[in-house]
Image (cartoon, rainbow, N blue to C red):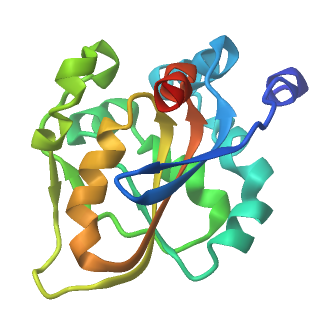
Amino acid sequence: MCFGCASKIRPHPISFDIDGVRVLSYVQYDDHISQLLIQYKEHRDEALAPLFFEPIKKSILKKFKGYSLVPLPSSKEKVEQRGFHHLHRMIEPLALTVSDVLVKSKNVKQAKMTREEREHIDQIFEINIVENDFLDRVLLIDDVCTTGSSMRAAIRLLRPHCSVLKAITFAYHPLWVQQKQD
């Protein structure tokens, strides 16, 4: 991992609501972030994993002490193809309890979906939790918020099973910010 890669990540945190859940996002998605994520996820460059949440670790741990992390799921096929779960590697520096209660039931490439198709993303997520199980304080986590559809679907599934639900993403897409302002 080179200094140049790390130095081009310029935190510009914002927060917004998705279905009543506060989401904190740290950097604006741009060409550099896109290339880093492609290199990391698609070219399996695991050495890049610390670039994402390590620099903001103290802030996250201060704000979300005592929370359980629930990463948005990747399909089983994608994890096997990569040889690792990209979000798990990204969040390792946080050293918080991880609860993999969300499952992606279909292998769908969201980047290739239209905005309208993404609105129905909830049809590919399932929750793997016993009806009476309860997660106390949950921090839903994802790498990028593009349209908010994945977050929205996960929030709907998790809300009945936790007392406090918040969310963070590493990056937010500029179109998301524009959409929220319109």
Q: Is residue 182 visible?
A: yes
For the point 76% across and 62% down, the residue is 59
* Residue 73 visible in the snapshot: no
Comparing 163 with 131, the one in front is 163
Q: Residue at x 18, y 31 (%)?
A: 107
Q: What is the quadrant of residue 91 in the picture?
A: bottom right
Compared with residue 14, is residue 166 higher up or lower down, i.e. above or below?
below
Q: Position of residue 54 (x, y in %)?
A: 74, 51
At 78% from the left and 37% from the top, the residue drawn is 11
Q: Nearer the viewer, residue 23 or 48?
A: 23
Q: Position of residue 138 (x, y in %)?
A: 43, 72
The residue lying toward the viewer, choosing from 37 and 181, is 181
Q: Please state the horizontal and vertical placement of residue 7, each as a whole percent of the image.
A: 88, 28
State left or right for residue 107 relative to residue 145. Answer: left
* Residue 46 x %, y %: 59, 36
Which corner quadrant of the image does residue 93 belong to? bottom right
Is residue 135 positioned above or below 105 on the image? below
> Where, quadrant-wise, is the N terminus in this rendering?
top right
Q: Is residue 56 above or below residue 29?
A: below
